[in-house]
Image: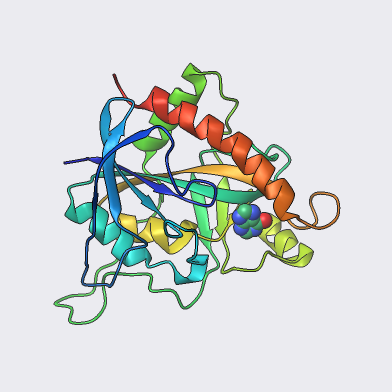
Amino acid sequence: MSEIAIIGGTGLTRLGSLEIARREVIHTPYGEPSGPVTHGHLFGRDVAFIPRHGPGHTIPPHQVNYRANLWALQHIGVSRVIAVAAVGGIGDEMFPARLVIPDQIIDYTWSRAHTFYEGNLKQVTHVDFTEPYSPDLRQAMIQACIAVGIDAVGHGTYGATQGPRLESTAEINRLARDGCDLVGMTGMPEAGLARELGLSYATCAVVANWAAGRGEGEITMDEVGRNLDAGMRDVARMLEALMPR
Ligand code: HPA
């Protein structure tokens, strides 16, 4: 049983260092997850891996079945979830290819299935979300970065947008006024659903590009690809340091 899981985002559809033991297809009361859960060993430790956008990167952010992914991970005994996610950088220190461990999130998404608490309820439930990410898991990731000399940012507010299009400059300016340092399309409802299930959840964001209007000219998929390649090498090093031998 793996108690730690990694949800891979854009740029991380497979974990190169994962020694694959088996793949498990899980059907959930909420429909199908993004793909089979891969069980394996990462630097000697049992982990489960699921690619958020599907094994072939075909599921856009607004169509990811977040409920099924998280339900499936809990079903196989996972208690801690590391979410890897590509983001745009808004604040000056959030430059491309940098890793960021955010500590807050604002939800701008709409019409996504965002809760397990609906339908035939015995009572209405409101989960606490004051600290949207697990402080322990965040600290572990920050310490792992320090241990291997990765210059990560250990804080920041993630603005979760609907996508799949990127934002306008005015939308990014509004996010900045709201206090967002990063922008991404998958942070919610994932973080909220993890909390509803009582999972420890934290995000390792990889800055793929300057957010709209913060860099020069248009955002190109070329620059996104290059920055994600560089950032994912650091994610692999961070994960290696995080896994106790
Ligand atoms: N905006 C939203 N999501 C993203 C971006 C962005 O600029 N870059 C990578 N994911």
* Residue situated in front as seen by the camera: 92 or 83: 83
- Placement of 185 over or under 7, stated as above or below: below
Residue 127 shows up from this direction: no
The C terminus, quarter of image: top left
* 154 displayed left or right of 245: right
- Placement of 97 over or under 158, stated as above or below: above
Q: Position of residue 137 (x, y in %)?
A: 36, 36
Image point 52% across, 70% down: which residue?
109
In what quadrant does ligand 1 lie? bottom right
* Residue situated in front as seen by the camera: 55 or 218: 55
Image point 40% across, 32% down: which residue?
17
* 89 displayed left or right of 112: right
Image point 48% across, 56% down: which residue?
187
The N terminus, quarter of image: top left
Residue 25 shows up from this direction: yes
Q: Position of residue 68 (x, y in %)?
A: 30, 65
Q: Position of residue 197 (x, y in %)?
A: 25, 57
